[in-house]
């Protein structure tokens, strides 16, 4: 190789090393942003659940679940605020129901550090920024059969929103009907939403254990698949959050969440729903606790039982990933699976 | 529409965008390696203006789209699925290795894809090498993630100075590069007056290499449309997923690829179907084939053994780099810099350095 070539090689190597050095320096001296953020757990969040409040009268179906027709006719209704809660990133942004506000479930409905729902002050901020008042009619919808829209409905109801509805059939039905979508980001004058906490909608491990030990007369509803319920599998394929024990909470009834839906993703009729759960011994005569794996699918069943049927229902969002990992709690495992043994 | 991945409107649009990209790549010879080599070896900067134009146009378009997708970037959030990655020494290393692979195999991954449409003999071994490289990248991911990537900062300019400020900086940097390269532009030849006849149009549109500014503008516009409607442009997601699926099925992957799926980029996944990215790639090859056939540039060739081996080895290096950098020259460089991500610039600079070192070491002698 001749001299200019060698000089070039030297320059290139020097440039590459300089870049490497700069990048290394940046990554070493950068401030620790995410790691040390402390969260003040909302004290009320961890308070024991009061189940004293009476079940409310079931509201008519069409005031809890809205049809795509109703929503299309009410898009300009200032009393109505539409919220999309989808799991797939970019879905909302590339086209949402016109005027809908985006809530991201991983940051806007849950605490990003502690395993908890979002802190009340932060939620109040977000709700106000979306132009929501306590009496606003909130219509949630999303992908994935409204799973996280239902989770959002549960958080809104816990924090004092009175009129929370789901779009029947969710995002996929709106799309399937070739209805209008918009990519414009909406902006609304700030609302006056004030958090009024209703802790009766949430259950914690001690509440569940009271039922297991017969100290509280409630019904547990496990909404996972029969294979998860029986303990044949630890979690559905592809899901990372696991428990080291398989099976279910003793005494729980198994009604998979999807049974509440028709094939097109819309809810079954009130009569069908009432019969579906009554056949499993869940008729609303006793308070109910729903759970699943991390709480997302169980919020769907919570919505059906609490909002559509008007039963008294709390969601145990710790669900199997807390219960199945807890030390010393009794477990029913009909499949007899043993962790770590084939 | 989104119920089944890789079907419906997004798949159809991906196919069309891929086709357009294939035509632009082929007619404009938008090959990152050739463009870099012209600059490094021949001191000809002309073709590089295609990349600069593509970056400028996509920056403008991205700024407009970002304004709708994430109205307030000061919130600290990142725009959804834009290719904004962690800036770590691993990224710089991946860029260098990718650049060396480009020199060794004679093109980057997108370059090989469009050359497949031209019948290039070394494209197949290079792409096969890339599939192997993806596998190696996935096998080494966990270690690099824990040692370097997990703690690395994800730096997105709009978080700091908003979209307007980012666009000004973006265009300023590109403008400075463009101005400083002016001296390496060949003088414009005097051209006689020409009648615009169908024959002339055919010559200009098909036979002659497109003006770099035109090629760059078209690539930039396609990049923005892809982000607006489907996902940021990238060409390694489907191929990487193929490697991941095969390795997964044979149990050759770690049970858990820590953090890999949580970054935006040319994400790989275990799939049994063609994703929208697969349709894009299909369109790219088809578009390039169509353009090459019309222009008489379709020349199927069998590579010599030495150049096949070089292409295979280069492909392996590129595949590894593309997994660690979460994309290649299209996904991380083009879609990343266009989205104002520092990771895009770091990858771009290190890829260029890698190509430079490769050319200096004459790694491209087998091309």
Image: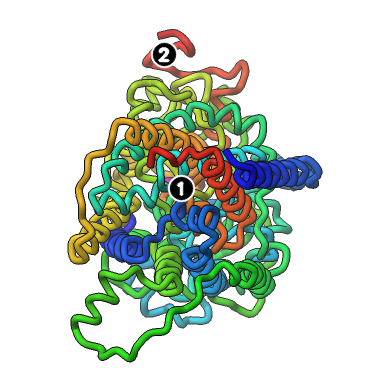
Given the image, what chain letter belongs to the residue carrying mark 2? Answer: A
**Where does the magenta region start and end?**
A298-302
Q: Is residue A9 left or right of residue A29?
A: left
Residue A28: image quadrant is top right
Q: Is residue B66 above or below residue B81?
A: below
Q: Which residue is mark 1?
A: B266
- The front one of B133 and A91 is B133
Expressed as whole percent of the image width and height from the top left, the position of residue B279 reads 28, 53
* Residue ranking furthest to the top: A341
Q: What residue is at 41 percent from the left and 32 percent from the top?
A: B313
Expressed as whole percent of the image width and height from the top left, the position of residue A163 reads 52, 66
The colour mode here is: rainbow
Residue A18 is covered by the magenta coloring: no
Expressed as whole percent of the image width and height from the top left, the position of residue A8 reads 63, 47
Q: What residue is at 39 percent from the left and 38 percent from the top?
A: B366
Mark 2 Cα-neighbour bin, 10 Å: few <14, some 14–19, many ≥20: some
- The front one of B278 and A204 is B278
Q: What residue is at 70 percent from the left and 65 percent from the top?
A: B74
Given the image, what chain letter belongs to the residue carrying mark 1? Answer: B
Q: Is residue B207 above or below residue B256?
A: below
Q: Nearer the viewer, mark 2 or mark 1?
A: 1
Q: Is residue A271 left or right of residue B190?
A: left
Quadrant (top left, top right, bottom left, bottom right) of the C terminus of chain A: top left
Q: Which residue is mark 2?
A: A337
Q: Main secondary structure of the magenta part?
A: helix
């Amino acid at each position: 190789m001749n001299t200019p070539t060698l000089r070039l090689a030297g320059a290139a190597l020097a440039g590459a090393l300089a870049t490497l050095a700069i990048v290394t320096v940046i990554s070493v001296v950068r401030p620790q942003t995410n790691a040390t953020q402390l969260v003040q757990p909302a004290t009320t969040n961890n308070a024991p659940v009061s189940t004293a409040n009476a079940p409310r009268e079931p509201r008519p179906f069409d005031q809890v679940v809205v049809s795509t027709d109703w929503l299309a006719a009410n898009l300009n209704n200032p009393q109505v605020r539409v919220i999309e809660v989808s799991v797939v990133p970019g879905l909302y942004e590339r086209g949402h129901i016109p005027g809908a506000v985006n809530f991201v479930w991983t940051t806007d409905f849950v605490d990003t550090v502690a395993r908890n729902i979002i802190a009340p002050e932060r939620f109040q901020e977000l709700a106000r920024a979306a132009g929501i008042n306590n009496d606003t009619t909130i219509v949630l919808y999303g992908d994935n059969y409204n799973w996280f829209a239902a989770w959002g409905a549960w958080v809104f109801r816990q924090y004092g929103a009175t009129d929370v509805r789901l779009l029947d059939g969710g995002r996929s039905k709106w799309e399937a009907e070739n209805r209008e979508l918009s990519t414009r980001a909406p902006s609304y004058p700030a609302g006056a939403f004030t958090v009024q906490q209703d802790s009766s909608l949430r259950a914690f491990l001690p509440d569940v254990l009271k039922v297991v030990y017969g100290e509280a007369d409630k019904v547990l509803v496990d909404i996972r698949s029969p294979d998860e319920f029986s303990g044949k599998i630890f979690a559905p394929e592809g899901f990372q959050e696991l428990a080291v024990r398989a099976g279910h909470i003793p005494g729980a009834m198994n009604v998979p969440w999807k049974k509440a839906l028709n094939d097109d993703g819309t809810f079954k009729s009130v009569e069908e729903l009432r019969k579906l759960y009554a056949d499993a011994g869940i008729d609303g005569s006793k308070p109910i606790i729903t759970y699943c794996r991390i709480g997302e699918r169980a919020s769907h069943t919570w919505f059906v039982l609490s909002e559509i049927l008007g039963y008294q229902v709390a969601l145990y969002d710790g669900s199997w990933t807390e219960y199945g990992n807890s030390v010393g709690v009794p477990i029913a495992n009909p499949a007899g699976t043993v962790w770590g043994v084939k | 529409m989104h119920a089944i991945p890789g079907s419906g409107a997004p798949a159809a649009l991906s196919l069309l965008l891929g086709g357009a990209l294939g035509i632009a790549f082929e007619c404009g010879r938008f090959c990152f390696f050739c463009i870099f080599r012209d600059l490094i070896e021949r001191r000809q900067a002309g073709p590089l203006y295609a990349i600069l134009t593509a970056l400028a146009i996509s920056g403008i378009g991205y700024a407009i789209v970002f304004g709708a997708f994430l109205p307030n970037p000061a919130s600290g959030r990142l725009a959804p699925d834009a290719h904004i990655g962690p800036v770590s020494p691993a990224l710089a290393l991946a860029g260098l290795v990718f650049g060396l692979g480009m020199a060794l195999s004679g093109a980057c991954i997108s370059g090989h894809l469009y050359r497949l449409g031209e019948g290039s003999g070394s494209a197949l071994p290079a792409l096969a090498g890339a599939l192997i490289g993806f596998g190696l990248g996935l096998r080494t991911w966990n270690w690099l993630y824990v040692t370097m990537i997990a703690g690395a900062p994800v730096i997105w300019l709009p978080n700091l100075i908003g979209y307007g400020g980012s666009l000004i900086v973006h265009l300023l940097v590109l403008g400075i590069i463009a101005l400083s390269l002016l001296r390496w532009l060949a003088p414009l030849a005097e051209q006689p007056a020409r009648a615009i006849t169908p024959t002339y149009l055919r010559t200009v549109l098909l036979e002659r290499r497109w003006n770099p500014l035109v090629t760059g503008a078209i690539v930039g516009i396609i990049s923005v449309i892809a982000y607006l409607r489907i996902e940021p442009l990238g060409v390694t997601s489907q191929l990487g997923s193929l490697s991941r699926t095969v390795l997964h099925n044979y149990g050759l992957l770690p049970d858990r690829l820590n953090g890999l799926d949580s970054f935006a980029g040319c994400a790989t996944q275990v799939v049994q179907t063609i994703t929208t990215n697969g349709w894009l790639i299909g369109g790219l090859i088809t578009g390039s084939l169509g353009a090459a056939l019309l222009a008489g540039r379709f020349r199927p060739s069998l590579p010599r053994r030495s150049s096949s081996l070089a292409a295979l080895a280069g492909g392996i290096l590129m595949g590894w780099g593309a997994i660690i950098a979460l994309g290649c020259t299209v996904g991380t460089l083009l879609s990343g810099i266009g989205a104002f991500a520092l990771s895009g610039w770091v990858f771009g600079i290190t890829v260029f350095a890698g190509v430079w070192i490769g050319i200096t070491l004459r790694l491209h002698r087998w091309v």
